[in-house]
Amino acid sequence: KAGVTQTPRYLIKTRGQQVTLSCSPISGHRSVSWYQQTPGQGLQFLFEYFSETQRNKGNFPGRFSGRQFSNSRSEMNVSTLELGDSALYLCASSIEGVRAEAFFGQGTRLTVV
Amino acid sequence: SQKIEQNSEALNIQEGKTATLTCNYTNYSPAYLQWYRQDPGRGPVFLLLIRENEKEKRKERLKVTFDTTLKQSLFHITASQPADSATYLCALAKSSGDKLTFGTGTRLAVRP
C-alpha cells in the first residue's frame, strides 16, 4: 500500500510570506502528526490531528496552524515566515496514535531566505 | 521540566559487535516508548514499541528494554552491520491520547 506522501518536497520562500504544506496519510490512518526537524533542536512536535480534530499541540507560535480533512489528508500552514522556520517538516500517520507505529513521509524541506 | 536524553556523541563500533544505545528520561512517566531509525534526508522509520508493563521486546537482531524504575530504555542491535549505521531516536508518550515526544537521537556508525 502507498506510504505517507508529503508535497512539495522542497520549497524556498521569502521572509514574511506564508506557506502551506500537504500530507496524505496511509489509507485508514486517522491520526496525522506534524514535526519540525532542525539540526540543533531535533524533532519538535507541532500538532496532531485525529478524525479532523486537533488532539495535541506543541509549543509553537500561532503562526503555525494545521487542519485535517474528512479523507484524513492534512495541511499545515505557516504565516509570516521567519528565517528560523527553515527546517525539514515531517508528517507521520498512525492507525491508533501512539499505541501503534507511526509512518513518516519523506518530509518537506523549507528554506526561508 | 520533562526531558528525554540520548547520547549526543556518535557511537562507533566494529561490525559483528552488539551496539547498545541509551534513552533516559526525567519528570516523565511514559506509557509507551518507541524506537525509530533515521537516515540522512529521510523520515524516521519505526523499529519497536514497548509498553510500560513490558520489560523487554525483541525483533530479529533488535532488543529493547524498559526500566521504569531507572527511567531508562536500552536499545540493542546484535551482530551489527555497516547497514545499521544511522541515527536512532527514542520517543515517549504518557498515554494513548498523548503526543509522541522524541529524543535528539544517537548516531551509530558500524565499521566494516
Image (cartoon, coloured by chain):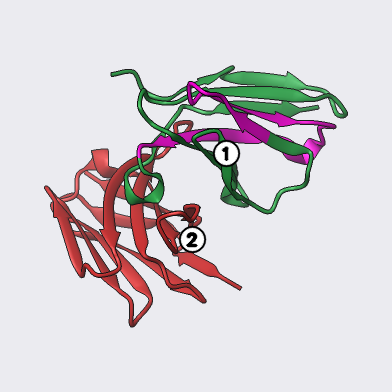
- Taking the view exactly as shown, the residue that stands out farthest to the right is A16
Q: Residue at x 48, y 66 (%)?
A: B5
Q: In the figure, is residue B10 to the left or right of A86?
A: left
Q: Residue at x 42, y 61 (%)?
A: B95
Residue A53 numbered mark, or none: 1
Q: Quadrant of residue A19?
A: top right
Q: Secondary structure at mark 2?
A: loop
Tell me the amino acid under the disc marked 2. Answer: Ser
The location of residue B37, given as percent across then percent down, is 35, 44
Q: Secondary structure at mark 1?
A: strand
Of A54 and A64, nearer the camera is A54
Q: Which chain is green?
A: A
Crowding at dot 1, Cα within 10 Å, few <14 / some 14-19 / many 20+, comes out as few
* Magenta-tinted stretch: A66-95
| Viewer-side label of 2, 1 | 1
Up/down of A108 relative to B1, above or below: above
